[in-house]
Amino acid sequence: MSETQPLSELSPTDLAAFRDAQQTAYDALVASGLKLDLTRGKPSAEQLDLSDGLLSLPATTTTPDGVDARNYGGLAGVTELRAMFAELLGLELDQLSAQGTSSLTLMKDVLSYLWLKGGVDSERPWGAEEKVRFVCPVPGYDRHFTLLEWFGIEMVPVPMTDDGPDVDAVTALVADDPSFKGMWLVPTYANPTGQVTTQEVAERLASMPTAAPDFKIFWDNAYALHHLTAEETKTADIVSLAAVSGHPHRPVLFASTSKITYAGAGVAFVGGSRETVTWFHANLGLGSIGPDKVNHLRHLEFFGTPQGVRDHMDKHRELLAPKFAEVERILDERLGGLGVATWTHPRGGYFVSLDVLPGTASRVIELAKTAGVALTPAGSAYPYRRDPDDTNIRLAPSFPTLAEVTGSMEAVATCVLLAAAEKLLG
Amino acid sequence: MSETQPLSELSPTDLAAFRDAQQTAYDALVASGLKLDLTRGKPSAEQLDLSDGLLSLPATTTTPDGVDARNYGGLAGVTELRAMFAELLGLELDQLSAQGTSSLTLMKDVLSYLWLKGGVDSERPWGAEEKVRFVCPVPGYDRHFTLLEWFGIEMVPVPMTDDGPDVDAVTALVADDPSFKGMWLVPTYANPTGQVTTQEVAERLASMPTAAPDFKIFWDNAYALHHLTAEETKTADIVSLAAVSGHPHRPVLFASTSKITYAGAGVAFVGGSRETVTWFHANLGLGSIGPDKVNHLRHLEFFGTPQGVRDHMDKHRELLAPKFAEVERILDERLGGLGVATWTHPRGGYFVSLDVLPGTASRVIELAKTAGVALTPAGSAYPYRRDPDDTNIRLAPSFPTLAEVTGSMEAVATCVLLAAAEKLLG
């Protein structure tokens, strides 16, 4: 699109002039006193407003199957809400449990149960193993990695490709080494790259031989319904794929309404084979007499039907798509053709993944910070916060207003250009 | 009150006649087809109705300190709700965290963190110790015991006295044996005995030497505000007592609104020293981006002030006190003076603890079950479900209607008398 030439082809004099121009632009940015934030994948206030109908619900306190939602009980959650999201997630009712507000908490719970007790198909608790390792597609979700770090689980990165995780790399790691107990995967609109794991890759992950008999795919379908275009990508049916390939208990699914209704007050889900869900409840039940069924009922009444959820997501798309388009426009206009960055073009989810010149990501983030634009810390999308090439920056345009996205991204572009020029000048 | 004589003083003939009379009464009970339940400490529908104002709250989505309750963040919970319950529980603001709906979940979380990471004052994670044991006052809360069992923590019972746990027994156990890492205590209106731990006992528990440097008192103040009389028992200030005696991190407090608002959709709290709360959040934060702040705000608006909570509890008392009085009346009228049972006279909480003739509790529970009256399984109030004397039965009269309490208790009395007569006849 751009007619400019790659920075690396500029003469030293031209490059120095370019650097000086960017420095001047940057100084002006700093002087302008920005206070902007592109760090977290948080819904905006406008998006949250879409769900304010929740505030005066539920209209009744009895679930359709006759349970008083206000009292104790019902470990699996409100049946009809489970049915609604089972349909949306392509599961059977008894393959899904509805719980509290956070799928991250459910991931920690599942890891705790595996660690202390072992899974349906474990020979012993994971905590009794000499070493436990996880395959981590990168760049990935920082909270996935810090959670594993808390457990002392060693993380081994594999690259994300356009089709999902590099499945050759995954299969090679897990085939002979029983210390590999699991892997993370955000199958649809991955955090932060936006990639969608294809049916073929999912099938290979479901069927691949693993040395560990209890290998788990933590299938974090956080953005299952979070389309940015009219095309509604369908997530691969990992539970069925795993079942037919003889590894029925391999996947553990996670999802939530955090980015459908309220980020802090939605409903989170955990799923898998019937046995996995039964196992989850058996361990959960030691510390729970049931989830917040009133909030389940509130959500059930708010949506009415699975189609109600899809319709609701269209409203989110109307708010989000222009922000993503603005990120794309500015990256393209400011950085296109200069050979200093590549970026993803997500068709859903909450992030744009920006790769700058190797060795400049932390410099860009530092420059942006000084200019008042908060970006996710360098290396966040990698295990142990180590981005080996210091190249990746995660951009989260959902929370700021459109005008703030414009301001932030113009600033980010300036920082990328300045850091690139500095780098090329050596 | 009763003018009858102890059964044990009856002649064999009179006793046999008494047994036959009870058998006839019991057969009539069975024939009447009861379907009653005294098993769980659940609020009744009428009690839950008291909080239905929650259903159309919150009226705003912004907390008093300007936070959007609908979005992510705020790991400690909504400040003003914490302040409200800190006042009610006698804590400073930063000694209390407001979380999800269940204090039982918080207990499991705290145990998990101690197990995997160790506490503020631990030398190593509890899971790395050769053996971990807990002191368990008995009879106690079944879910406390099953939770420890899940972790593989060995339970050693000590008796409850009228002043709280037998503190001499506790101090003797923990003084020299570092495997004792903690103890359970429901300090106010204990489950199931209703006893209140006195200031003196609390002081001794706070100050007693323990071989383990990281000994914890799990201070489950589930019934802090749940008075059955006009006298509002004040719970001992264990956090201050522990601080002044040099063991500031010993207590971990738990409380919730499960029996204040909704049993399944309230707010739970965890507290202790500032360092304990900071430690809790540091571990919690790996698997949480913050609790349900909308529900916090809902509760804050519903109560308005700490006095609002107290006033609300008066309404619960109006509903509960007649049920407890009915239990007392029937036990007294039917069993008084017969030397076959003793029972507690709780001034708060949710239970009456009934001790029948040694060796007959499981028979009474079996008889009641056959007659259609569900009682908590024999031994439930003891670690490993082992009531050494087979004597204890927990009665929970909150959930049934008053008429159902009458029916249940008349049935229970008949079962107690029949079992006693059978036992005495040998």
Image (cartoon, coloured by chain):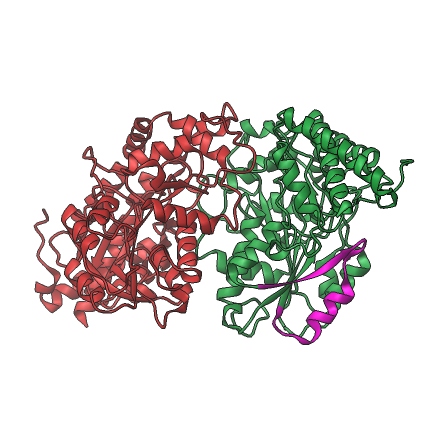
Chain colours: A red, B green
Residue A337 lies, with reference to residue B347, above or below; the image says below
Where residue A301 appears, x then y in whole percent?
A: 42, 26
In this view, the residue in front, A31 or A396, is A396
Say if the magenta span includes residue B173: yes
User: The N terminus of chain B lies in which quarter of the figure?
Assistant: top right
Please count the marks in the image. Answer: 0
In the shown orientation, is residue A179 left or right of residue B351? left
Kindly tell me whether residue B356 is visible in this rendering.
Answer: no
Q: Nearer the viewer, residue B267 or A245?
A: A245
Indicate whether residue B86 is drawn in magenta.
no
Q: Where is residue B334 in the image (x, y as percent from the top left)?
A: 81, 34
Image location (x, y in percent) of residue A244: 20, 47
Q: What stretch is highlighted in magenta?
A: B154-180
Examine the rendering and report whether any part of residue A93 can be seen: yes
Quarter-of-image position of residue A119: bottom left
- Report the residue that reaches farthest toward the front: B13
Q: Is residue A405 above or below residue A418?
A: above
Q: Which residue is drawn at 81% across and 53% down?
A: B162
Relative depth, front residue between B408 and A419: B408
Q: Which residue is drawn at 38% across and 54% down?
A: A372
Q: Give the percent coordinates (x, y) of residue B348.
A: 75, 41
Q: In this view, does A287 lie to the left or right of A259?
A: right
Q: Residue at the location (69% across, 70% down)? A: B174
> Please, is residue A240 above or below residue B324 in the view?
below
